[in-house]
Image (spheres, helix red, strand yellow):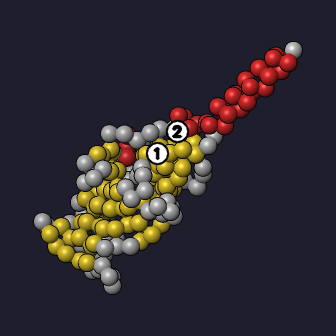
Amino acid sequence: MKKKVIAIILSSTTVLLLLGLFFVPFRTALVFHVQNTEQIQAFLPIDEEDTFQIIFTHSIHLTDVVEMYKVRDDRHIVQTEIIYEEFGIGMPSNAEEGEEFVYEDGKYHIRDLNNVFSSMNVRNGKTVSKNRLAWGENGEKMVWFNEYFTPGDWYNVRVEELTLWQYMKGMKIHE
């Protein structure tokens, strides 16, 4: 009888521990939430100090705009650079104090940006739906937003710790 009670306690404890593991955060990711909800549309596993880029085609002058970001150790997102080919609506015309404005290889660069975000709202283009997400040492890995997101919809993006359960049921972004 005593052995049976111990076996039940051990097996119950093991089951509870295994279930608990499903709900303990274990992996940092760049998470795309559907609008103002907690519903995860997709996620990209990412580490502190990793970089990523959001590339979109400007809807008026139809040239690419590259926004470069870095993940801080406090899970904030820092915009570090913006690259574009033409001035126009929504494009900066100069650098602010502490930033560097250069023209290089036919493109304008504003470097040394320090725009810090706890989250960002990102819209997948509808009229010109050519948005991309790039990551890796030099942005060599890339996916099209349309592979994961509905054109015209917007997403709240933030860096979070995912549980094993969220990781398993979510849509992992991969090249």
- Measured in 3D between alpha carbons, the distance from the residue under mark 2 to the one under mark 1, in whole angstroms, is 8 Å
**Residue bearing the label numbered 2:** 167
User: Judging from the image, what secondary structure is the residue with disc 1 in?
Assistant: strand
Residue lying at 37% horizontally and 39% vertically, measured from the top left: 174
What amino acid is at disc 2? Tyr
- Front-most of 76 and 43? 76
Q: Is residue 89 visible?
A: no
Residue at the bottom extreme? 97
Residue 120 spot, x, y in % from top left: 48, 61
Q: Which mark is residue 127?
A: none
Q: Quadrant of residue 16?
A: top right
In this view, which residue lies farthest toward the front? 2
Q: Are marks 2 and 1 in contact (CB under 8 Å)?
A: yes
Residue under the image location 45 percent in, 69 percent down: 116
Left-right relation of 147 to 1: left
Tally of numbered tags: 2
Position of the N terminus by quadrant:
top right
Q: Residue sitting at 29 percent across and 61 percent down?
A: 66
Provide residue 133's location: percent of width, then percent of height: 34, 50
Mark 2 or mark 1, which is nearer to you? Answer: 2
Query: How would you rate the neighbour count of disc 1 (Cα within 10 Å): few for under 14, some for 14-19, many for 20 or more?
Result: many
Q: Earlier in the sequence, mark 2 or mark 1?
A: 1
Q: Position of residue 54 (x, y in %)?
A: 34, 56
Q: Residues within 10 Å of mark 2 (few under 14, many from 20)?
A: some
Q: Which mark is residue 43?
A: 1
Question: Is residue 168 something that shows in the picture?
Answer: yes
Q: Residue furthest right?
A: 1
Q: Is residue 82 left or right of residue 171?
A: left
